Structures are given as structure tokens and as C-alpha cells.
């Protein structure tokens, strides 16, 4: 895997038929959709991929099939976050065995832990990994907003970057500043609206959920940001905002983003819209709104 890892790396949804059955044809169409959109990598089994709701057997099937479909055209990294150290290692070892490129580590997500406990956790986990690893700061889901000291420790242990999904732009900029002299250490935003700011300030890319739907839009915005084309950035950013104001606005709960992306992909005839328990897919009224929004977005983007 070429370092630094950079560009648009979608957090790929996991297409499902039911709670324990992969939508195989949907996965094939989704991967082809993303590759044809020019994305620079894939992140499977993250938050958008509903990883923590899936059995290990299903996670492994997704890992293997994705690896086969991508066939080393672009890097694929996989989330291994678990409540158990050995659960994380089981997925990491399987991922290495089938040929993935890297793993992504967030703090264990049930027991509240301190920064020093997280650093000790990494000291125990990392030496057992056979693949490069990135950190993943997702305080909404893990109870921990990792400190700069914790990320510095991860880098000392060999981390190749961090995906920052804190939504805290000052923290994002502090990461870019802290690691500006480490050109192979990637600072990747998990907040897609921060993409341009991340690149313009010296970061490397975004794990953008909306790229599941419109990969080329995000690739174009990344390229405009790299080229510091401020006029084009303004136009493309407005189009990204349309996704926030439409697809991401349907539903009342925080789960609306995952459900909205899956529903939209179903409307686009790419994959099934089933979401794993405890979440439930959108009902007919919500789906109708998504159908209308996809029509609007397609008119705007084409």
C-alpha cells in the first residue's frame, strides 16, 4: 500500500438480504460503482458498514468477497474494532490471510476507558497485527475522543494514519499540524464536509459516506482541493451539501445517515436496503422522499 494513504476512501455499506445473509450481487454492483467512480480506496466494516451488528462469519464473507472483487486495484482497509482484543485479532488475522491491505482501529466501544488504558491496549494489540493499521477517532460511538498523545503513541507503534470522525475541526487541524513533518502519516477526515479544508490545510483525504452514492462527485472535489481550485471547490461543495440537505435529512434519528445511504442505493438499483438489527430500514413514506431526492440530485449532478 502506497503511503500516505490519500484520496476518497468510501466507508462502504454492507449490502444485506437479511440479518445474516450478504447481498452478493449488490456487493458486486456496489464495488463496480465505486471503482468506476474513481475512488482511491475502500474502508469496509466501519460504522457505515454496520460492522458491530454483523456476525464474524458474515464479516469474513464480506472481507473475502470484497478482496476478490477489488483484486488489488485500490487499497482496501477493514475495521477490526471489537469489545474484545481477541475478536479484533481474529478479524485482523483473517483479513491478512485473504490479502487485504490494512486494518482500522477504534477504541473498544462498551467499557469506558481512559487515554492511558487505550495506549496500553494498543501496546498489546499492535505487535500481534500482520497488516498496517490506521487509527479511527469516533467518539459518538466509542465513548472516547482520542487525545493527541494517544495518536502520537499509535504512530510510535507504527500507525500509518488516522481517520478523524470527531466532527471537531480544531482537533482535525491540530492533527495536521502535529504530524506535518511526517509525510507518510495520513490525516483523513471522516466528516465529508471537511474534505476541502482537510486538503487545503495539508491533510490527505476523506472517508466520505456520500461517496457510496456519488463517488465521482467526491473524487472531483478532492482533485479540485489538491489543485487549490477555489471556484470549482465552491461549486462541488454546494453539491455535497445537497446530499446533507436531502438524503441525510430523512428520518428523525442519528441512524438516518446509514439508512438513507442504503435506501438511496436501493433506489439507484445498486443493492438491497436491508439494515441489520437493531436498526430498521426506511418505510414507504421515507423511501418515497429518498426517491424524489435521488431524482433531484441526478438532475443537479448531470
Image (cartoon, rainbow, N blue to C red):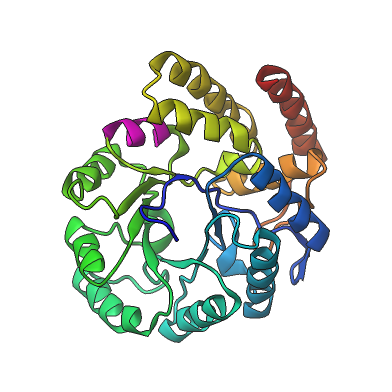
Q: Is residue 146 visible?
A: yes
Which quarter of the figure is the C terminus placed in?
top right
Residue drawn at x 76%, y 56% as measured from the top left: 28
Rendering coords of residue 299 (x, y %): 73, 18
In the rendered structure, the answer to whether residue 116 lies left or right of residue 32 reads left
Residue 56, quarter of the rendered image: bottom right
Rendering coords of residue 71 (x, y %): 65, 63
Rendering coords of residue 58 (x, y %): 68, 74
Which quarter of the figure is the N terminus placed in?
bottom left
Q: Is residue 106 magenta?
A: no
Majority secondary structure of the magenta segment? helix
Residue 52, quarter of the rendered image: bottom right
Rendering coords of residue 54 (x, y %): 64, 70
Q: Is residue 197 magenta?
A: yes
In the rendered structure, the answer to whether residue 299 lies left or right of residue 118 reads right
Q: In the image, is residue 193 above or below residue 151? A: above
Q: In the image, is residue 46 above or below residue 56? A: above
In the rendered structure, the answer to whether residue 243 lies left or right of residue 122 reads right
Residue situated in front as seen by the camera: 45 or 184: 184
Specify the segment rendered in magenta: 194-201
What residue occupies the far top of the structure in this picture? 231
The mark tally for this picture is: 0
Q: In the image, is residue 150 above or below residue 280? A: below
Residue drawn at x 69%, y 67% as measured from the top left: 68
Q: Is residue 277 visible?
A: no
Residue drawn at x 25%, y 72% as measured from the top left: 157
In the rendered structure, the answer to whether residue 106 lies left or right of residue 100 reads left
Residue drawn at x 79%, y 63% as measured from the top left: 24
Amino acid at each position: 500500500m502506497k503511503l500516505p494513504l490519500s484520496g476518497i476512501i468510501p466507508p462502504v455499506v454492507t449490502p444485506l438480504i437479511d440479518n445474516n445473509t450478504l447481498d452478493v450481487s449488490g456487493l458486486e454492483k456496489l464495488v463496480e460503482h465505486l471503482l468506476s467512480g474513481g475512488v482511491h480506496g475502500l474502508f469496509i466494516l466501519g460504522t457505515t458498514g454496520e460492522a458491530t451488528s454483523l456476525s464474524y462469519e458474515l464479516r469474513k464473507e464480506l472481507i473475502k468477497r470484497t478482496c476478490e472483487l477489488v483484486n488489488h486495484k485500490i487499497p482496501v482497509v477493514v475495521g477490526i474494532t471489537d469489545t474484545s482484543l481477541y475478536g479484533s485479532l481474529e478479524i485482523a488475522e483473517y483479513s491478512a490471510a485473504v490479502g487485504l491491505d490494512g486494518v482500522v482501529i477504534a477504541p473498544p466501544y462498551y467499557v469506558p476507558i481512559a487515554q492511558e488504558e487505550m495506549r496500553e491496549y494498543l501496546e498489546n494489540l499492535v505487535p500481534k497485527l500482520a497488516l498496517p493499521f490506521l487509527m479511527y477517532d469516533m467518539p459518538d460511538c466509542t465513548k472516547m475522543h482520542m487525545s493527541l498523545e494517544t495518536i502520537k503513541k499509535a504512530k510510535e507503534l507504527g500507525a500509518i494514519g488516522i481517520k478523524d470522525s470527531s466532527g471537531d475541526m480544531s482537533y482535525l487541524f491540530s492533527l495536521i499540524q502535529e504530524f506535518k513533518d511526517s509525510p507518510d502519516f495520513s490525516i483523513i477526515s471522516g466528516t465529508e464536509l471537511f474534505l476541502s479544508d482537510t486538503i487545503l490545510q495539508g491533510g490527505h483525504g476523506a472517508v466520505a459516506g456520500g461517496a457510496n452514492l456519488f463517488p465521482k462527485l467526491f473524487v472531483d472535489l478532492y482533485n479540485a482541493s489538491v489543485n487549490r481550485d477555489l471556484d470549482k471547490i465552491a461549486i462541488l461543495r454546494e453539491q455535497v451539501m445537497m446530499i446533507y440537505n436531502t438524503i441525510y435529512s430523512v428520518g428523525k434519528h442519528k441512524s438516518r445517515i446509514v439508512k438513507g445511504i442504503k435506501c438511496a442505493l436501493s433506489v439507484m438499483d445498486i443493492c438491497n436496503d436491508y439494515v441489520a438489527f437493531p436498526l430498521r430500514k426506511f418505510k414507504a413514506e421515507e423511501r418515497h422522499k429518498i426517491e424524489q431526492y435521488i431524482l433531484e440530485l441526478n438532475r443537479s449532478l448531470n
